[in-house]
Amino acid sequence: NAALLLDGVEKVYNQGKPNEIAVLRGVHLEVSPGEVVAMVAPSGAGKSTLLHMAGLLDTPDAGRVTIAGDDLSGKSDRARTAARRSKIGFIYQFHHLLPEFTALENIVLPQLAAGVPKGEAQERALDLLGKVGVAARAAHRPGELSGGEQQRVAFCRALANQPGLLLADEPTGNLDPGTSDQVFDALMTLARDTGLAALIATHNLELAGRMDRVVRLENGVLVDA
Ligand code: ADP
Ligand code: ADP
C-alpha cells in the first residue's frame, strides 16, 4: 500500500462567486513507504491547500485521499481525526513547542494523549531525541534551546506516535544551512530505517534535490520536477 495516495484531488475556493479560484485541478500523487518526496511550488500555488488535504484537515471537492490503504475521502470527521492523530505527523516552519514544558515532555505529552504508558513514552522520546542528536537537551525548555534544537525537538514530537506519514511545510525555512542539514539527515535516516514516508514542501531546491523525488505544483496539478 502507498503511505499516501492522492487521486484526482480538486479544490475550489469561493465556488460560484466572482472570486472563485480552482487551486487544485486533479492532483495525483503516490508516496511509498520509506520514500521522501519534495514538493516545490511558487507562493500561492496551493501547497498549503494540498498539505491540508493530505493531512485530512480539509476535504477535497473531488477525488480521493488514501492513507496507508485506508480511503478516508467519504468518512466521518471522527474517523478522519482518528486517522490523522494515529497515522500522520506534522512539522511546520515554526515549531509551536509548548514553552512551559521540557523537550522531553513536549514529545511525551502527545503519546500520553494517545494512551501510551508514561515509561514507554519517555523511552521513545529519549530514543527520538538521540536520533537527531539532542538527547543532552531533554530537560531543557524550548526557550533554552537554539532554533535548530527546537526544530529537531518538533521533528521528534511529530514522530512521537510513530505515524507512517510525515507532512511538513517549510520545515527548515528558519534554520541555518548546517542545522537544516541535521534535521534533513535525521529524516532520511528514519525513512530508511523505519519506512517512514514524507511529503515535504520546501523552497530550498538544493535540499529538495537530495530527496528521493521532487514534484512541482503548477496550475493546480503536480508534475515531476
Ligand atoms: P501556498 O501554500 O502555495 O502559498 P495556498 O494553498 O495557501 O497556497 O493558497 C492557494 C490559493 O488559494 C491562494 O490564491 C489563496 O489565496 C487561496 N486560498 C487559500 N485558502 C483559501 C480560503 N480558505 N478561502 C479562499 N481562498 C483561499
Ligand atoms: P489535537 O486536538 O490532539 O491537538 P488535532 O487532531 O486537532 O489534534 O490535530 C492533529 C494535528 O494536526 C496536530 O499536529 C495539529 O497541530 C495539526 N492541525 C490541526 N488543525 C490544523 C490546521 N487548521 N492547520 C494546520 N495544522 C493543523
Image: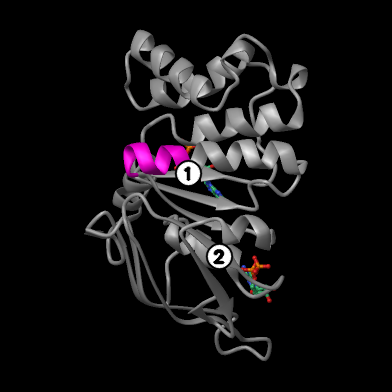
Tag nearer the camera, 2 or 1: 1
Q: Is residue 117 above or below residue 32?
A: above
Quadrant into which the C terminus falls: bottom right
Residue 12: image location, x then y, percent = 53, 80
Quadrant hosting residue 220: bottom right
Tag of residue 188: 1
Mark 2 to mark 1 CA distance (whole Å): 16 Å
Tag of residue 39: 2
Q: Is residue 1 above or below residue 165?
A: below
Task: For mark 2, give the secondary structure.
Answer: strand
Residue 113: image location, x then y, percent = 40, 25
Tag of residue 136: none
Foreground residue among 212 and 151: 212
User: Left of 139 or right of it: where is 24?
Assistant: left
Inspect the magenta stretch and tell me whether residue 168 lies in it. no
Task: For mark 1, give the secondary structure.
Answer: helix
For badge 2, the amino acid type reads Met
Write the start and end of the magenta stretch as one range: 189-195
Residue 58: image location, x then y, percent = 47, 62
Quadrant into which the N terminus falls: bottom left
Magenta stretch, overall SS: helix
Q: Residue at x 75, y 31 (%)?
A: 147
Crowding at dot 1, Cα within 10 Å, few <14 / some 14-19 / many 20+, comes out as: many
User: Left of 181 or right of it: where is 107?
Assistant: left
User: Left of 131 or right of it: where is 193?
Assistant: left
Q: Is residue 219 above or below residue 81?
A: below
